[in-house]
Each structure stands twice: as C-alpha cells, then as structure tokens.
Amino acid sequence: MRLRFFLLALGLATGLASAQAPDFRGAAGLTALTLQLNGQLVVIDTAFSRLEISTGVNQVLSLNLVRADSPDDQGLTILIDQFPLAPGQYRFKEILSGHVRDASYRYGTTTAYSTTCGLNDGVVEVLAIDAQRHTIRGTFRAVLCEAEPRPGAKRRRFAVAGTFQSVYATR
C-alpha cells in the first residue's frame, strides 16, 4: 500500500514538473502560442503567426501573434533588440536605456503601443532555447495603450499576456 502511494505521488510530482516545464526533445515541430487580451483568451492563427530571431551584430527577437478571427490584421507584435539568444527576462521599461523593447497591437481600427503608456513593467521571459533545433519557449506580459482613441473617447488600455513555444526562423 505504501509503495503504491509512493509511486502515485512520484508520478504526480513528475507529471506536474513536466507540465510546468515542457522541453523540446522529440517535439521540434511543436508550436504552441497563447494570447490573453484583458484576461480574455484570443485564438491565435498558427499559420500566419511567426517567431523570428535576426542574426548579426544586434540580434532581434520578433514575435508576431495573428488573431485567428482576423488573419489580415497584424495582431500583437513584440520586439526585443540586442537579444543574446539566451534564457532570461527582457523588460519593456528598458526602452529608456537605449534598448528597443516594444509591443504593438493592431486589430481593425484599434492601434495600441506599449510605449504610449509611459512606464511599462512588461516582460518577455525566455525560459528555454535549443539553438540546434531552433526552438524557443517563454512567456510575455505587457500593457499597451490606444494610440488614437475615437474623438471624445478615453484612451483604452490593453493588458496582454501569453506563452510561446515554437520553432524560430532566423533572418
């Protein structure tokens, strides 16, 4: 009885650990992208969404999540410059230190930017990178503010959050 309980507990602990930190072994083509906008899940079109990392002196991580209900709109775009191709936290507020760390959202007539909100404590956290298989996994969160509200309307704020796990392209 104790042995069964121990094995069950060990199996649950192992399952929880692997659910929280999936790895890329055997899953080179796996793409999983999520986006929440003001707490509401937005379905992502994985065919049009992309994750790219530029090569060269100033590597840039570019994440573009396109909405499934509007594949012609740009959706959410996140840029992190001077990206060292390493796990870590990349904060949006560092834009004041010369880094280009920006997020934008375009959907229909709505355009919002992280830079129009002033201080933004948003972050992209890269949790794992496999440079041989060109796979990357992480999370993001930020606040974006409407750039051009309708006349007489109050500027809207959008809280975005999500996860990414994808094969990345280099350009």
Image (tube, rainbow, N blue to C red):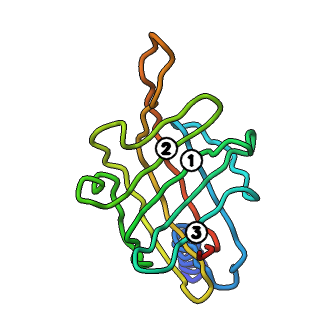
Residue at position x 46%, y 58% from top?
79
The image position of residue 156, as x and y in percent, is 45, 26
Residue most extreme to the front:
57
Look at label 1 and name its amino acid: Leu
Residue at position x 49%, y 55% from top?
78
Residue 103 lies left or right of residue 45; in this view the side is left
Residue 76 lies left or right of residue 68; in this view the side is left
What residue sits right under mark 2 in the picture? Answer: 160
In the foreground, 61 or 121: 61
CA–CA distance between discs 1 and 2? 9 Å
Of marks 3 and 1, which one's residue comes earlier in the chain? 3
The image position of residue 125, as x and y in percent, is 42, 64
The image position of residue 120, as x and y in percent, is 32, 44
- Contact? badges 3 and 1 (CB < 8 Å): no
CA–CA distance between discs 2 and 3? 20 Å
What residue sits right under mark 3 in the picture? Answer: 52
Structural crowding at the residue carrying mark 2, measured as other residues with C-alpha within 10 Å and reported as few (<14), some (14–19) or many (≥20)? many
Residue most extreme to the top:
152
Q: Nearer the viewer, mark 1 or mark 2?
A: 1
What residue sits right under mark 1 in the picture? Answer: 76
Of marks 2 and 3, which one's residue comes earlier in the chain? 3
Quarter of the image where the N terminus is located: bottom right
Residue 27 lies left or right of residue 1; in this view the side is right
SS label for mark 2: strand
Look at label 3 and name its amino acid: Glu
